[in-house]
Image (spheres, rainbow, N blue to C red):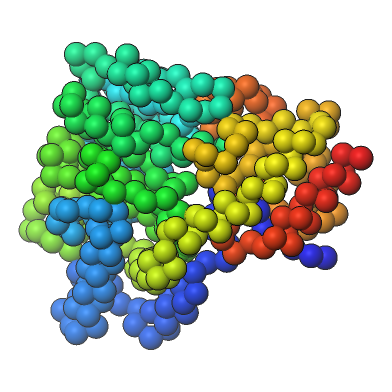
Amino acid sequence: MKKVYLDNGSTSFPKAPEVGSVMKDFIDEVGCNVGRGGYESAYSLAERILGTREKLCQFFGFEGNDSNVVFTPNITYSLNILANGLLHEGDHVIISSMEHNAVARPVEYAKKRGVAVSVAPCDAQGRLDPQKVEDCIGPKTKAVMMLHASNVCGTVLPVQEIGELCEQRGLFFILDSAQTAGVLPVDMNKMKISALAFTGHKGLLGPQGIGGFLLRDEISEAMDTVFQGGTGSLSDSLVMPDFLPDKFEVGTLNIPGILGLSAALDYVNGLGLDTIRNREMELLKPFLEEMLDTKGVAVAGIPGMEGRMAILSLDFTEKDNAEIAFRLDEEYGIMTRCGLHCAPLAHQTLGTFPRGTVRFAIGHKNTEEEIRYAIEAIRTLLA
């Protein structure tokens, strides 16, 4: 059976060329640790890790030190560290009503520590008016924490406007770039971002299990450490180092993942974000247009091409969404994701809660033939 992968919102496939071979070569031929060995292989590996930090600084328009890049297992770990390290009793944080649980759950948990949370409402297409964020700002507001684009429907939020607002009001701005890094430009300097959380396995086309965050000194100084343990530095002390990245980077790193991410960054940089995004949007256009004209299908989010990512979230109003997703896979080999996509707030905003949607997330390696095949499969299932 033909296999069509349309679940790139979950993780990208295929990965960038060389990712697998670079990781395999490290495991088979190098294998040592970093910061924990006094020999040439360990020193050489440290330089490769440093090189990856430097690539990330350049990629995300960060003008600070490369030591301000912290590696974590994934973006959810990153957002937890940022929320738990920054927010304390009496603080107030603002999120949007389109958040993934990677933001929504850490701030909900922060309420137990006496942190107040406000949710800036988005409209029924997932769009956010910056004024809604400003309306939430109070005397104890410490940060705005939000995603760049919805994983449910692809709506892009006004990050630069929110960043400028935060700078004007003296607030920290924390961005979840899970759905945009590697597809849309993310410039920390231009967008006034205090801390940027990223993951390697989605738009960056790297492996699972590697993510991280870049943060400015000002927000680092306002944060507590979250995890305690070995760092390969200051081993005489029982207290965590207060310098970066060691302040937040504890234990053995996912070195194969970092090296795989480095190879993926080279590929994305070589291909160019415009090339990747334009290709994805070219594929989205006929799919979106067909679904807008299909009886029994409701498109969640923006019904046009502007202000969105190449994510198409469909509610099959006269059928069971889970059955449609199952039959797409079972009968046509089309891989999607059905349900609430770890984003109940977003589905409540879009009017698709608790039913959820079937999400088709396009990647730049998909083809026109695959999109046409998916359209025809949907038509057949609805006939």
> What's the residue at 38%, 41% (across, down)?
176
Q: Is residue 321 above or below residue 269?
A: above
Q: Position of residue 258 (x, y in %)?
A: 35, 66
Q: Position of residue 242 (x, y in %)?
A: 11, 48
The foreground one among 153 and 334 is 153
Position of 316 with respect to 225 (left or right) is: right
Residue 269 visible in the shown view:
yes
- Which quadrant holds residue 84? top left
- Which quadrant holds residue 143? top left
State the count of labels: 0
> What's the residue at 22%, 25% (across, down)?
142
Q: Position of residue 88 (x, y in %)?
A: 23, 25
Position of 383 with respect to 234 (left or right) is: right
Look at the image and tell me in which quarter the C terminus lies: top right
Q: Position of residue 334 (x, y in %)?
A: 74, 55
Residue 316 visible in the shown view:
no
Residue with the most extreme right position: 383
Q: Is residue 65 above or below residue 263?
A: above
The foreground one among 199 and 252 is 199
Look at the image and tell me in which quarter the N terminus lies: bottom right
> What's the residue at 42%, 82% (across, down)?
25
Q: Is residue 163 above or below residue 241?
A: above
> What's the residue at 31%, 30% (across, down)?
162
Position of 106 with respect to 247 (left or right) is: right
